[in-house]
Image: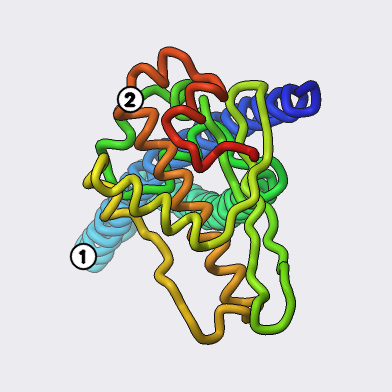
Amino acid sequence: MEHSAGLRQEVDSLKKRLTELEERHAAKVQALMRENEVLKVQLKKYVGAVQMLKREGSQGNDALTIQRNCDGPPPAPQNRSVADIEELAASYERKLIEVAEMHGELIEFNERLYRSLMAKDNLIGQMRQELIDLRGPVPGDLSQTSDDPSLSDFETTQRALVNVWIPSVFLQGRAANAYHVYQVYIRILDNEWNVYRRYAEFRALHNYLRPQFPQVDTFNFPPKKAIGNKDAKFVEERRKQLQSYLRMVMNKLIQALPEFTAQPTKETLLQLLPFCHPA
């Protein structure tokens, strides 16, 4: 029990840290997107200003050329005005180049940040799956085992009342009489125990639940297979399917039976589901 409590504290700490990291990354992305929009607006303004100055400079040069041909040398003030326009245009061009470089750096940084976030998301998913394989589903995992939206109508604390998973499968018997036994680990709050069941017992459980809960027919229960049922790959796939099935069953019990939710104990579960009896 102390070990389970320590693991739950570790999971809570990891979830809190993950939430903080996601919030910081989201804030960075939003800030970069806002800065990106500002730079785009500035870029448009600078481009428009440079084009306008080029047009004004071209018109000024044309006017000076005409005046020079007609009236001789232009007056000094007009020369200074054209020089000022050219200097301003050059300044805008330099600024435009700087903004373009900043925009390129920002896009590159956004791409690096996106790749980093995707890598961290993948790592978190792998760590979560490893944690589930080691100690059973973390809080909220049960709701992810079914596509039925009605199974998500209760609180996370209720979903975490019962955790179940199948950590191992082993072969018993010899030759033609050999069969696989599945280790089923069950935890209710701080009470945990193991039961060992054959596939036939899982199938009996499925048939037992169908009249009581018609929705069980929609759950993915692995079919019987007479040939090739000793293959290691097949056994591992069936283990995962039975584990997912049991989690959906527990999910349904919590949703449909308020008396169990009100008193989540081992004794209550055994009364509702004799399959879980350790004997």
Q: Secondary structure at mark 2?
A: loop
Instruction: Give residue 35's position: percent from left, percent from top.
Output: 45, 38
Between 116 and 151, the one lying in front of the other is 151
Q: Quadrant of the N terminus?
A: top right
Q: Could you tell me if residue 79 is visible in this image?
A: no
- Left or right, 274 with respect to 59, comes to right
Q: Could you tell me if residue 26 is visible in this image?
A: yes
> What kind of residue is marked 2?
Leu
**Residue displayed at 77% across by 24% down:** 6
**Residue displayed at 62% across by 25% down:** 16
Residue farthest to the bottom? 227
Q: Secondary structure at mark 1?
A: helix
Compared to 41, does 270 lie above or below? Answer: above
The residues tagged by marks 2 and 1 sit, at their Cα atoms, a distance apart of 96 Å
**Residue displayed at 59% across by 54% down:** 197
Between 168 and 196, the one lying in front of the other is 196
Between 24 and 218, the one lying in front of the other is 218
Compared to 55, does 251 lie above or below? Answer: above
Between 81 and 212, the one lying in front of the other is 212
Report crowding for label 1: few under 14, some 14 to 19, many 20 or more residues within 10 A (C-alpha): few
- Please identify the quarter of the rendering in which residue 128 is found: top right
Q: Nearer the viewer, mark 2 or mark 1?
A: 2
Instruction: Give residue 144's position: percent from left, percent from top.
Output: 42, 44
Instruction: Give residue 58's position: percent from left, percent from top.
Output: 28, 61
Q: Which residue is mark 2?
A: 257
Q: Quadrant of the C terminus?
A: top right
Q: Which residue is mark 1?
A: 66
**Residue displayed at 40% across by 42% down:** 249
- The answer to whether marks 2 and 1 mark residues whose Cβ atoms lie closer than 8 Å is no
